Amino acid sequence: MTDHPVASEAMAAILQLGPTIALPDAESIEARRATVAAALTGPLAAGTIADEAPLGGRPALWIHPATPVAPDATGPIALYLHGGAFEVGSPTAYQAFCSNIALSLDATVVVPDYRLAPEHPFPAAVDDALAAYRDLLDTGHPPSTIALVGDSAGGGLVLSCLLAAHRAELPQPAVAVGISTWADLTLEADAHQRCATTDPFVTTAMLRRAARHYLLDTDPRDPLASPVHAPPDELARLAPILLLAAANEVLADDSSTMAGRIARAGGDITLDLFPTAFHAWPLAGDSIPESRDALEHLTRFIRERWHRGPV
């Protein structure tokens, strides 16, 4: 785990707001989707371009450096699974952040438009994530050049996709990264009480509603829904994983518990728990120093693990 300095002024200003920025629980799903789209959607980073093309049977946004480093299918690629509590979010909403990842990696980032609840409950999102990963393999991308990255529910989908790939006897990608990962849909972790007043963006009530819509009658301990409950023999066989989380967010224990279980199983896991940040803070961009530093950290982690041969 990395040592981190005292929070910057920009970070501290957001944290002082307390749990006041979270989406209102009473809003309709359409209103929540519109709010998230308005809050997140920004322009592509200068020096990047984007194309729309299907992946795994779903629409997807492909973001590249303006001068692609690898015109063929063998170049490194990051499959990004967006956050949004399995209910909101889209590739377009994430184009600004993912274009910054593409620049930092000097590689393609592809964001699939996986199906959302409540219209498409579990396991639709997991099926779509696995189909996207399988499609990359089938179209010639060596697993040693693939990274899986995601935030919040998308971070949980990254872990679920790794488990699903293992069960489908597919090779693991070179590396995986989860940002503020939602990995335990039981919502029983201590952080839901401990951090109830220190997380400005996410509330347990919001997550409880989303989990209900996503799971329907599925047991929340199903490992493909809540990867933290996967058996040790499966956790030991996953790709090298980096989990980034804020110690003061309600999902902090999802990352720390997941990391502990993978470590005890003998897997390759790195946990970086920031003492003072907010949920999915790397998405905030250059205006917050901690966000810029986290982006550099996660992309360096990926670059160091690409091109080392299949896991």
Image (tube, helix red, strand yellow):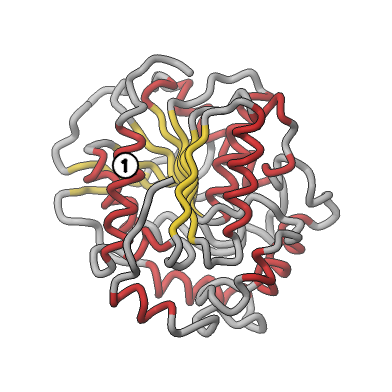
Q: Position of residue 50 (x, y in %)?
A: 27, 48
Label 1: how many residues lie within 10 Å, few (<14), some (14-19) or many (20+)?
Answer: some
Q: Is residue 99 left or right of residue 143?
A: left
Residue 240 percent location from the top left of the image: 48, 30
Question: Which image quadrant for residue 238?
Answer: top right
Residue 21 visible, this orientation: yes
- Could you tell me residue 261's position as x and y percent? 66, 38
In screen coordinates, is 111 left or right of 172?
Answer: left
Q: Nearer the viewer, residue 310 or 305?
A: 305
Q: Is residue 59 visible?
A: no
Considering the numbered disc 1 on the image, is that residue within a helix, a strand or a loop? helix
262 relative to 207, above or below: above
Q: Is residue 150 above or below residue 192?
A: above
Q: Is residue 246 above or below residue 30?
A: above
In the shown orientation, is residue 268 left or right of residue 125? left
Residue type at tag 1: Thr
Q: What quarter of the picture does the N terminus occupy? A: top left
In the displayed structure, would residue 35 be above or below residue 308?
A: below
Q: Position of residue 113 (x, y in %)?
A: 50, 50
The residue at the point 52 percent across, 35 percent down is 269
Of 174 and 133, nearer the camera is 174
Q: Residue 206 appears in which quarter of the rendering? A: bottom right
Which residue sits at x=70%, y=63%?
190
Q: How many marks?
A: 1
Residue that carries the numbered disc 1 in the rendered image:
299
Q: Nearer the viewer, residue 8 or 39?
A: 8
Q: Residue at x 34, y 53 (%)?
A: 294
Q: Nearer the viewer, residue 279 or 84?
A: 279
